[in-house]
Amino acid sequence: MGLTIFLDGEFVDKEHAKVSVFDHGLLYGDGIFEGIRAYGRKVFRLDAHLDRLYAGLKKIRLSPPMAKEDLKKKILETLKRNDLDDAYIRVVVTRGVGDLGLDPRKCGKPTVFIIADKIALYPREFYTKGLPIVIAKTRRNHPSSMPPEVKSLNYLNSIFGKMDAIDAGTDEAIMLTTDGYVAECTGDNIFIARNGKLSTPPYEIGSLDGITQNVVIQLAGEAGIKIKRDMLTPDDLYAADECFLTGTAAEVIPVISVNGTLIAGGIPGKITIAMMNAFSELTGIEGVKY
Ligand code: PXG
């Protein structure tokens, strides 16, 4: 049996889940999305994801097509209908169908869809051996051009970063701000450990206010590990004792080299492993049941 998709108020088969070529989500990337995970029939940090989605809609001045609580129910129903124990959920709200012009006022009603499917993470070996990454040639969007808190449907900045990673023979790349500070990776936030303390960049400089990042900040606090929002340079990465990435898709993944410079002697560090274990424990117990 194929996947069942929620689209504009109805549940339809994947084959019938189609949107118009006049949808401004497609024509201009005008819309917002969220990526959410479910573990063992529980959706992890669902409210935080919905809050971020609705904050994004407000920022792009798109009035929500449905109440947050209703969307939440539809997400849970999509998971139930597809009978998924573990899943990756993609929620998308676009400006809707308009004409061939940018004017968002000409779009009738927003398009909303929910896809729940399996997810392929980075190959499993990277979680034990660690991920080699590079610094992307492409710089992160400047926050004055693209507010970092908006998970917009236009991800070309990250896709350029991803292509830089692929060109360098790696799977992930760090994106620097226009003035050269570490912002984040193409779809993950970044942490370093130095002298037993963790640092991660402030989101105001141009990274997403990551939900997994905030979970790790919470877990580090609970484990008595000092954690600070810090402006980091590439030199701080090269000099770090440990480095790891966080994201809904990636979870917590160790980094073992940056531009070929080994970190932590090329093996995942102690704090990284502690955070990976704490994260996996939490996703096993916390979440909204369906
Ligand atoms: N930075 C960016 C730019 C992201 O897109 C994160 C950080 C991590 O945030 P969360 O809240 O998920 O911890 C993201 C989210 C993918 C993919 O296919 C990645 C994300 C979203 C959707 C798809 O790699 N990352």
Image (cartoon, rainbow, N blue to C red):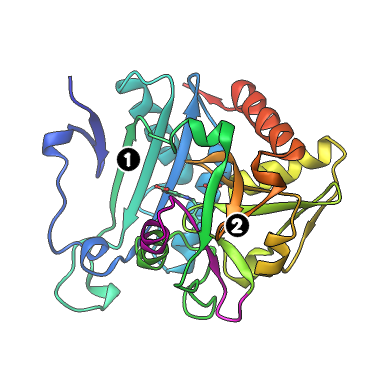
Q: Is mark 2 within 8 Å of ligand 1?
A: yes
Q: Which residues are magenta?
A: 163-180
Is 250 positioned to the left or the right of 276 in the image?
Answer: left
Q: Is residue 27 magenta?
A: no
At which x and y percent is residue 67? 44, 46
**Residue type beneath disc 1:** Ile
At which x and y percent is residue 241? 76, 50
**Residue type beneath disc 2:** Asp
Q: Which residue is more in the foreground, 271 or 146?
A: 271
Is residue 245 placed above or below 27 in the rendered structure? above
In the rendered image, which quarter is residue 236 located in?
bottom right
Q: What residue is shown at x 59% (from left), y 46% (from top)?
A: 246
Around disc 2, counting alpha carbons within 10 Å, would you say few (fewer than 14), some (14 to 19), or many (20 or more)? some
Residue topped by disc 1? 114
At which x and y percent is residue 29? 30, 65
Q: Which residue is more in the foreground, 208 or 135?
A: 135
Q: Earlier in the sequence, mark 2 or mark 1?
A: 1
Q: Is residue 219 visible?
A: no
Q: Is residue 158 visible?
A: yes
